[in-house]
Image: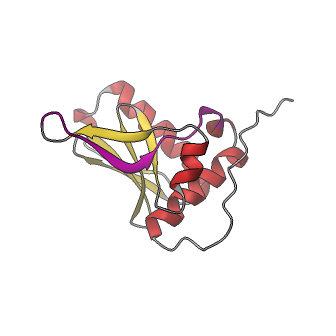
Amino acid sequence: MSILLLVEVSMVKTNNKKLIESYLKKLSIFGNITAKSMFGGYGFYLEGIMFALMAYEILYFKTDKETVEVFIKAKQKPFIFEGKPGRPIVMSYYSIPKSAWNSHENLKPWFELALDAARGNFKAKKIKTPKNRLKTK
């Protein structure tokens, strides 16, 4: 799988560039994931569909009315930015548990929920909270 980073490298802080590359590498098992600079953050795409955004060095996954409760149940936080003075705007993007990054098995259900929400074609079925267990060798 190829990884494509579509940002102006000279404008990206070194730590942000490394973090973006890290997210891209971990997500690359799902296909040709790209990241594009936008509004001070980055959008993450698969086949032209934005399924995640990075802001404040956190990757937030797309949700919709069917999937948001899974993220809330897992005690994840939404992406919020300051709109008009004193008016925070809550977006339909949520963080995922840190343990989801420990393995592809843990990350896959969160990725699939985000991609389904981004595609807008979530199938009506019972939603199960992805298991986030640590594997020991």
Q: Quadrant of residue 39?
A: top left
Q: Is residue 97 left or right of residue 5?
A: right
Q: Position of residue 3 (x, y in %)?
A: 48, 51
Q: Position of residue 33 (x, y in %)?
A: 47, 55
Residue at image coords 51%, 57%: 114
Q: Position of residue 104 (x, y in %)?
A: 68, 46
Q: Which residues are magenta?
A: 85-99
Q: Is residue 89 left or right of residue 128?
A: left
Of residues 127 and 31, the one nearer the viewer is 127
Please identify the quadrant where the N terminus is shown: bottom right
Magenta residue check for 53? no
Q: Position of residue 17 (x, y in %)?
A: 37, 33
Residue sitting at the far right: 137
Residue at image coords 44%, 64%: 118
Residue at image coords 45%, 71%: 120
Magenta residue check for 91? yes
Q: Is residue 106 above or below residue 11?
A: below
Q: Is residue 17 left or right of residue 102?
A: left
Residue 1 visible to the viewer: no
Residue at image coords 28%, 33%: 12
Residue 90 visible to the viewer: yes
Of residues 22 and 53, the one nearer the viewer is 53
Q: Quadrant of residue 10?
A: top left
